[in-house]
Image: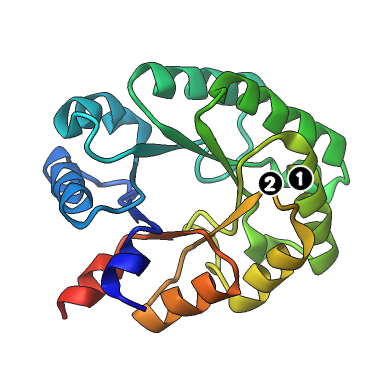
Amino acid sequence: MKKEEIVRHVDHTLLKQTATWQQIQKICKEGIEQKTASICIPPSYVKAASAFVKGQVPICTVIGFPNGYHTTETKVFETENALQNGADEIDMVINLGWVKDGLFDLVEQEIKEVKKVCGNHILKVIIETCYLTEQEKKKLCQVVNRSGADFIKTSTGFGTEGATAEDIQLFSENVSNQVKIKAAGGIKSIADAEKFLQLGAERLGSSSLLGFFEA
């Protein structure tokens, strides 16, 4: 695959707890120059980054991140605030405790409430696959199918493991045509990126992928 073809699928990401404004500006510039799908940054930087990029690259931010156990009301407020500050896309983390309790109806309702706030803005649902059984992953594909969300996403990058080929294959077999797939976490090479895209991923979340092209 050509570099440009891969890069247009990349959510160029910086979500480290110690991320500085100088570092955020750097990935904004890189996202603009390389024409990435978006830049994915902490909520606290969305307003400044929106003014900085002036619409030249979409801004993505995270909600309920990275643990997902915030209340639904908190996630809805976070989403409203992020959109008011200029976010174009929202990546939300589900409540994994509810999954383990079998409360898939609550997970689905929460996603629906966040999507209602998002409106036409893209919503990606992070299910953190490293903590889930295969059956739980399949059930969550069904939940996301019904929720109105735009994407299902593998990982926060803060769990015990990131995206795997097996999970992207499972998603491809279980999500509807209306739901796209985002692979995130642990994309360590151009070969990984190509593999995930070939398996059906539409987006790649990575903090390091652009650097591989410069090596």
**x and y percent of residue 96 in the render?**
71, 47
- Is disc 2 in contact with disc 1, using a CB cutoff of under 8 Å? yes
Q: Tell me which label, 2 or 1, sits earlier in the chain.
A: 1
Answer whether residue 182 is visible to the viewer in this image: yes
Vertically, is 193 above or below 55? below
* Residue that mark 2 sits on: 178
Left of 59 or right of it: where is 117?
A: right
Q: Nearer the viewer, residue 150 or 28?
A: 150
**x and y percent of residue 148 in the render?**
70, 34
Snapshot quadrant of residue 124: top right
For badge 1, the amino acid type reads: Asn
* Residue at the (76%, 67%) spot, across then down: 173
The secondary structure type at the circle numbered 1 is helix
Left of 2 or right of it: where is 53?
A: left
Indicate which disc residue 145 carries.
1
For badge 2, the amino acid type reads: Gln
The secondary structure type at the circle numbered 2 is loop
